[in-house]
Image (cartoon, helix red, strand yellow):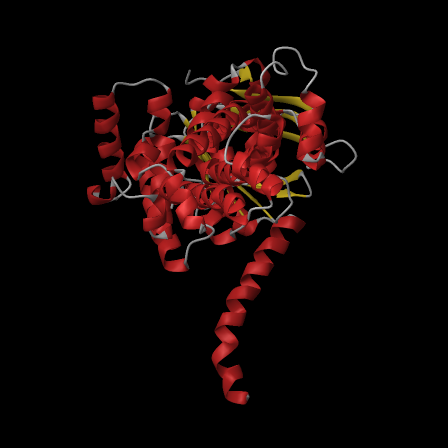
Amino acid sequence: MSFWHFLVQNRRQVLDLTGEHLWLVGWSILLAVAIGIPLGILVTRVPRLNKLVLGSANIIQTIPSLALFGFLLPAPWIGERADRLAILALMLYALLPLIRNTYTGIRGVDPAVVEAGRGMGMTDRQLLLQVELPLALGVILAGVRVATVLCIGLATIAAAIGAGGLGEFIFRGLAMVNNQVILAGAVPAALLAIFADWGLGWLERRLTPQ
Amino acid sequence: MQNGPAIEFRDVSFGLPGSPEMVHDLSLAIPWGEMLLLLGRSGSGKTTSLKLINRLLTPTRGEVHVEKRVTTEWDVIKLRRGIGYVIQEAGLFPHFSIERNIGLVPTIEGWEAAKIQARTKELMELVGLSKDIAKKYPRELSGGQRQRVGVARALAADPPILLMDEPFAALDPITRAELQREFLELHRRLRKTVVFVTHDFREALLLADRIALMDSGKLVAIHTPKDFLQSDNQFVRAYREAFSNDFMLEAIKPPRKEVV
């Protein structure tokens, strides 16, 4: 049976698993944005926290994903359901690109522009919302893009802890030593990553000033 | 408000820990309506002095008084909104249209939209900008136009004081001369108190009511342009000679070429 046949025959399940996959990635990116961008802003304001915050995010990034799922298993409430666990783990991986890009994006705004704004009596809040964030938006969105692509790939491993997603096919295929089944998980996941990359890249170009 | 100096430095020093002071024991009073040129080489402390006025920097010793109040006693936001600020390359917001750039201070001061629009239009006329560029962005403008926008933006909320940090330095000589003339004209009409930083001797002579010469963080001479040309203060002489050599070099260029 060819890969294409398998895909068509199991289209319901492919769609369901793709939906689960997106659900896991969507939530983790949403949470990572909600936490990572404010943290990125914070380290531009309180430079002493820079090493701590970026360092921690860096360390999380080096933990192998399967191990991270394992570490989080004993956590209360989170550990009760596999999807919560997966979302938390993916969110932690997505934090680094978001914090780092928010930080570098804001630091990269022309200091003369910021000083002109400050010299004309803009408050710190006005500078942040009207000048720094809009000018850093392109870089921040690039961070969202990297994080999303990263999470789409990593989310396949979430199936190992029973959180669903396209990884189900991959693990099943591995167990069955059946390449068609593996590809039925891997190809849609890769397509998702490509689409997300393209779509967010388009948004980035649209929203970047000049 | 009109009696007493607009700005006064009283024994002001500024330095960062572990490095030599950038401004040293500066005392200087600037009366209302004066155009004072701070002249000096790079690193002489003139930009630092300027930033001490709108409290982008705070003196390490001494006091800067603006409208008879010490800058540290002012609400810093209020202080800055009452002082127009123009910098080199204008420091315009690249993601704001020209009219939004000009209307910045009125907007953050919470003026009504109609009033801001009227004011923006008035200012564009005042600084000689065509109203067709209102919706354009800074990158679409020439250097001279951008600098005019910078001046219009600084004047938007009608502040009594203007600080200008080498505003025309990056322009080509012809555009620069044009903007200098126009700015002088504008100053005669509006009579703002202006503190203008430059390293260009000719610009200082052209614009100034008084020229304050700075060297290594110290105020070394203060004169009207006329006295400045005659002063035998050593720093003034050095500046004058540097520029007269410059003129002489230009004068002897053609014969040199023939020799070669």
> Residue pushed farthest top?
A76
Q: Which of A173 and A188 is in front in this view?
A: A173
* Quadrant housing residue A200: top left
Tell me the quadrant of the picture where the N terminus of chain B can be found.
top left
In the displayed structure image, the side of residue A132 where residue B158 appears, left or right: left
Residue sitting at x 41%, y 39%: B92
> Residue pushed farthest right?
B18
In the displayed structure image, the side of residue B76 where residue B191 appears, left or right: left
Q: Looking at the image, is B66 positioned above or below residue B255?
A: above
Residue sitting at x 39%, y 25%: B160
Q: Is residue A148 visible?
A: yes
Q: Position of residue B209 (x, y in %)?
A: 45, 39
Q: Which of B120 and B4 is in front in this view?
A: B120
Residue sitting at x 35%, y 34%: B101
Q: Is residue B14 visible?
A: no
* Quadrant housing residue A60: top right
Tell me the quadrant of the picture where the C terminus of chain B can be found.
bottom right
Count of numbered badges drawn on the protein? 0
Q: Position of residue B68 (x, y in %)?
A: 52, 16
Residue sitting at x 38%, y 51%: B143
Q: Which of A169 and B232 is in front in this view?
A: A169
Q: Looking at the image, is A92 positioned above or below residue A141?
A: above
Q: Position of residue A14 (x, y in %)?
A: 42, 36
Q: Where is residue B127 in the image (x, y as percent from the top left)?
A: 29, 41
Q: Which of A93 and B156 is in front in this view?
A: A93
> Residue pushed farthest front?
A1
In the displayed structure image, the side of residue A27 where residue A208 appears, left or right: left
